[in-house]
Image (cartoon, rainbow, N blue to C red):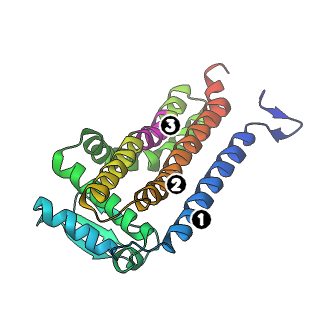
Amino acid sequence: MPYYYYGFDRTYILVIIGFILTMIAQAHVQNAFRKYSKVKTTKGITGLQAANYILDTRGYNDIEIKTINTPMGDYFNPATKQVALSPTSINDSSIASVAVAAHELGHVIQYKEGYTPLQVKSWLVPIVNFGTMLSFPILLLGVFLARPNMVDIGLILFGLTLLFQVVTLPVEFNASRRALSILEESGMLVGEENQFAAAMLRAAAYTYVAATLTTALQLLRMVMLFGGSRRD
């Protein structure tokens, strides 16, 4: 194949680029979290207090907050109507904890207001899970049987993962904008604390951008390696 040179798969460079992007993004968000975990809010607001304020002021009485023991693993599940926050996000009064908790409540507001990208993302979840499970078996079977149509189906199914991540980007950025607006307007954060929170959430957003670019590179590599089966 044209992408091999003396036994070396040149497309593997795309994997290396994706790995580097991911490592840079993860290091950036971890450094930001460590930095802003040391900066306490002037008013002593904790992540839980920020979350409860948002729920109470909007009358979202059907949303439950639960604790998970996964550092930086906070999330909102629309299916169960649960906001999962780490012990740090709940108990700490740092800028990082308040920003992360408010971000997850930004997703709650999206859910309540019927934010279209979030609805599309939720709709895609089972389809993407199904596609991810079948993409490689179908792709490899297509290559083994020399069936270009099966190869195409495998590539399309893998492409659903990229579509899901692309849809996720506006969801995450919008949740952060909502969170930052609430934190500033409510007075929970004051002065430069708002800029610190923005920096924290911006670093977190980079991980989603890096993941999307990495998946795009993976898909490009697969097309380069297996897409040629149509011409063989």
Residue 29 shown left or right of residue 176 in the figure: right
Using the image, determine if residue 54 lies above or below residue 169.
below
| In front: label 3 or label 2 | 2
Residue 55 is marked as: none
The front one of 82 and 143 is 82
How far is mark 3 from mark 2, CA to CA?
33 Å
Quadrant in which the N terminus is drawn: top right
Give x and y (percent) for residue 180: 34, 54
Q: Earlier in the sequence, mark 3 or mark 2?
A: 3
Residue under the image location 21 percent in, 63 percent down: 54
Q: Secondary structure at mark 3?
A: helix
Name the residue tied to disc 3: 154
Residue under the image location 77 percent in, 31 percent down: 3
Which three-letter amino acid code belongs to the residue tagged 2?
Answer: Ala
Give x and y (percent) for residue 45: 32, 74
Residue 16 shown left or right of residue 162 in the figure: right
Residue contact at pointers 2 and 1, CB within 8 angstroms: yes
Residue range of the region highlighted in magenta in the rendering: 156-166
Q: Secondary structure at mark 1?
A: helix
Residue 31 is marked as: 1
How far is mark 3 from mark 1, CA to CA?
38 Å
Residue 203 is marked as: 2
Which three-letter amino acid code belongs to the residue tagged 3?
Answer: Gly
Q: Residues within 10 Å of mark 1 (few under 14, many from 20)?
A: some
Quadrant in which the C terminus is drawn: top right
